[in-house]
Image: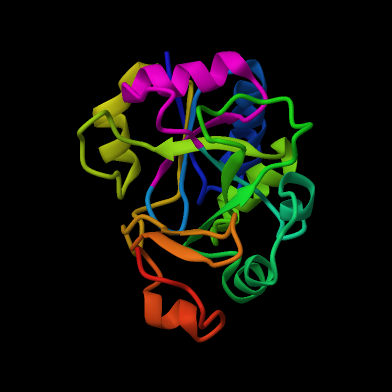
Amino acid sequence: MSLEFDMADPAARPRGLDAAASAARRGDLVVLPTDTVYGLATDAFNPRGVAAIRAAKGRGRDLPLQVLVGSPDTVEGLGYGLTKAARELVQGFWPGGLTLVVRQQPTLAWDLGDSSGTVALRMPLHPVAIELLRITGPLAVSGANAAGGAPAASLSEAREQLGDLVAIYLDGGPSLDAVPSTVVDVSGQVPRLLRPGAIDLDTLRTVCPEILPG
């Protein structure tokens, strides 16, 4: 049976964070608020949890999971051969609605899908998400919606679609901007927009003018 915590309640907040962190470490699923849409998450290094996200989303290995991090510095530990553009975009837009596809460190003991040696990283601009990530470390994540369902802009929308597949629901209120993150590939020498989203191309180019459209 799922548990739900109101993160606006000062008494419930620490209990919710502890419960979510414990669930993620076990490989159970957690729904958490972000600055874009609600996310479905688990420990990125737990094979059981990663498999559970794929099962809940009907998602194959050809669609690798993204990873949420709690600090901009984490990109240096997870990414390999980071380019100047990658560092400029991290500095300009993290935390925020920007996901960066980087070459991953070859020693990382995880299996997020068939990613050809890359990983998609984001630091969300949401206090609940950041607090949880600072406890857990990197979390594998996908949108908190069923396969083919609409992105969840509230906890109730996530719960309607995922039900008891999720162990812990963290309620951070409705999303203020329910648009998925923008995705930019910085794994090569020339950055390329893969998915438009929360941050538009013109805004990205104020920091990194060489980004190519998708």
Residue 128 appears in the figure? yes
On whether residue 56 falls in the magenta region, the answer is: yes
Asked whether the viewer can see residue 28, the reply is no
Total tally of numbered discs in the picture:
0
Q: Residue 12 appears at what percent x and percent y?
A: 57, 39
User: Which quadrant would the N terminus be assigned to in this image?
Assistant: top left
Give the colour scheme shown. Answer: rainbow
Return the residue found at the far bottom. Answer: 206
Q: Residue furthest front?
A: 189
At horizontal 55% and vertical 35% (from top left) the residue drawn is 116
Reply above or below: 109 against 9.
Answer: above
Q: Is residue 46 left or right of residue 58?
A: right
Residue at left offset 37%, top offset 66% = 198
The residue sitting at 36% across, 55% down in the picture is 180
Vertical position of residue 166 compared to residue 8: above or below: above
Q: Position of residue 67 (x, y in %)?
A: 57, 42
Is 101 contained in the magenta span? no
Q: Is residue 41 above or below residue 97?
A: above
Looking at the figure, which quarter contains the C terminus?
A: bottom left
- 6 sits left or right of 201 in the view: right
For residue 16, which quarter of the picture?
top right
- Percent position (x, y) of residue 175? 36, 57
- Left or right: 66 with respect to 63? right
In magenta, the rendered stretch is 38-65
